[in-house]
Image (tube, rainbow, N blue to C red):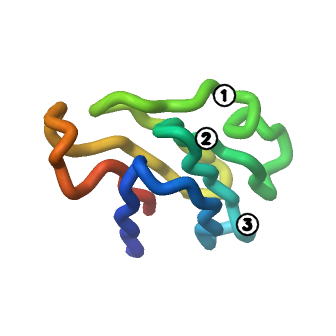
């Protein structure tokens, strides 16, 4: 089980290895979304972006999940984790 932590205040694209291949998650302007994934139906790519504590998105066929965690306080060190 792999877990990665990223802050929302730094724009980046992250490739996460899943069961079917790599999913690409984009963090931009405080929003997180699936940019691409190798799943057959691409529902994760079509889903809305997330930005608030407790929000989550997932590519279930690829086994990739992203959730925003941390305090509502803007000084929190951890904003997003993926696994």
Residue in the foreground of this view, choosing between 59 and 56 = 56
| Foreground label between 2 and 1 | 2
In this rendering, does residue 18 appear at all?
no
Q: Where is residue 72 in the image (x, y as percent from the top left)?
A: 18, 32
Give yes or no for contact between labels 2 and 1 (Cβ–Cβ under 8 Å): yes
Question: Callout 2: helix, strand or loop?
Answer: strand
Q: Where the C terminus falls, by quadrant?
A: bottom left
Q: Distance between the residues labelled 2 and 3?
A: 18 Å
In this rendering, does residue 61 appear at all?
yes
Q: Where the N terminus falls, by quadrant?
A: bottom left
Q: How far apart are marks 3 and 1 (CA)?
A: 19 Å
| Foreground label between 2 and 3 | 2
Residue in the foreground of this view, choosing between 9 and 48 = 9
Looking at this view, name the residue that lies furthest to the right. 40
The residue shown at (48%, 50%) is: 65
Looking at this view, name the residue that lies furthest to the top. 48
Left or right: residue 40 versus residue 52 is right
The quarter of the displayed image where residue 63 is located = bottom right
The residue shown at (62%, 72%) is: 17
| Foreground label between 3 and 1 | 1
The residue shown at (61%, 41%) is: 33
Question: Callout 3: helix, strand or loop?
Answer: loop
The residue wearing badge 3 is 20
Residue 34 - label: none
Residue 33 - label: 2
Q: Earlier in the sequence, mark 2 or mark 1?
A: 2
Residue in the foreground of this view, choosing between 48 and 12 = 12
Q: Which of marks 3 and 1 is nearer the N terminus?
A: 3
Left or right: residue 54 versus residue 43 is left
Q: Where is residue 25 in the image (x, y as percent from the top left)?
A: 62, 54
The residue wearing badge 1 is 47
């Amino acid at each position: 089980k792999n877990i990665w932590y990223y802050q929302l205040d730094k724009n980046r694209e992250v490739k996460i290895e899943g069961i079917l291949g790599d999913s690409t998650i984009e963090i931009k302007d405080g929003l997180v979304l699936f940019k691409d994934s190798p799943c057959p139906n691409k529902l994760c790519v079509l889903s809305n972006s997330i930005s608030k504590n407790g929000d989550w998105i997932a590519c279930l066929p690829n086994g990739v999940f992203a959730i925003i965690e941390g305090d509502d306080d803007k000084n929190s060190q951890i904003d997003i984790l993926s696994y």
